[in-house]
Amino acid sequence: MQINQRHSWPLTIEEAIAIQELLRQSVIAEDQLGPVRYVAGVDVGYDLAENMTQAAVAVLSFPDLHLAGHAIARRPTTFPYIPGFLSFREVPAVLDALEKLSLTPDLLLCDGQGIAHPRRFGIACHLGVLTNIPAIGVAKSLLVGTHDELPQRRGSWQPLTHRGETVGAVLRTRCGVKPVYISTGHRISLTAAIDCVMRCTPKYRLPETTRWADKLASG
């Protein structure tokens, strides 16, 4: 698949902030979804001994969630781990993996934040804008925002608010298990994002897309 690389990769936080502030203006938080036949999960692992980032993309058929394709890419790690700047550490390798795919996904589920981010531009936004593919942030932990108490039943959710704005949702994908944090990445509404995530999590806490990508990235 083709990638629209709209910027060089920064080496400083100041450069990274400038890119986030610029590209967040391109984020579309409304539904621009066509038919969804394939959903993709992305995940990243690290080889600390060799200072390498390994990214994996798993493409699953939808809605039956069978593995339909995958790709793995490695490249040197060039940006430090700093909360709020994950995309600058991970996205370069993810884009390399996406370029290897012969099958273009209709929706990306990212292991990280979308607009539930201090500057409203998490990794799901970054990938969505650069690929122009609808994207959802499905994070395992809270980065910003507060929410009301969440019922224990599967499918329950509460709005996630930050600085007076609804930036996402805290969603219970499995009864009695820790929730996940959903936010729009690009070209999808929060309501549609919640529905898609629920349809991709039939058994476990995390979407099948994430589970497959994690296996590939750490393998």
Image: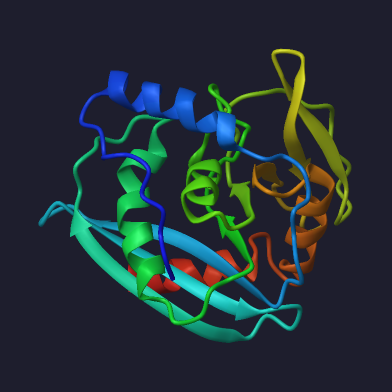
In the rendered structure, the answer to whether residue 15 lies left or right of residue 28 reads: left
Q: Is residue 91 above or below residue 45?
A: above
Q: Quadrant of residue 173?
A: bottom right
Q: Nearer the viewer, residue 94 or 207?
A: 94
Quadrant including the N terminus: bottom left
Q: In the rendering, at what x and y percent does residue 219 appear?
A: 33, 74
The figure's colour scheme reads rainbow
The answer to whether residue 116 is seen in the rendering is yes
Q: In the rendering, at what x and y percent does residue 172 appear?
A: 78, 50
Going 48% across and 62% down the picture, which residue do you hit? Answer: 42
In the rendered structure, the answer to whether residue 162 lies left or right of residue 130 reads: right
Going 23% across and 24% down the picture, which residue do you hit? Answer: 12
In the rendered structure, the answer to whether residue 73 lies left or right of residue 25 reads: left
Q: Nearer the viewer, residue 27 or 59?
A: 27
For the image, the number of numbered tags is 0
Please, which residue is most extreme toward the left here?
50
Q: In the rendering, at what x and y percent does residue 29 appear?
A: 72, 39
Q: Is residue 92 above or below residue 151?
A: below
Q: Is residue 109 above or below residue 212?
A: above
Q: Quadrant of residue 45?
A: bottom left
Q: In the rendering, at what x and y percent does residue 111 appear?
A: 53, 52
Going 70% across and 78% down the picture, which residue do you hit? Answer: 37
Q: Quadrant of residue 59?
A: bottom right
In the rendered structure, the answer to whether residue 178 lies left or right of residue 52 reads: right
Q: Nearer the viewer, residue 28 or 116?
A: 28
Going 78% across and 50% down the picture, which residue do you hit? Answer: 31
The answer to whether residue 176 is seen in the rendering is no
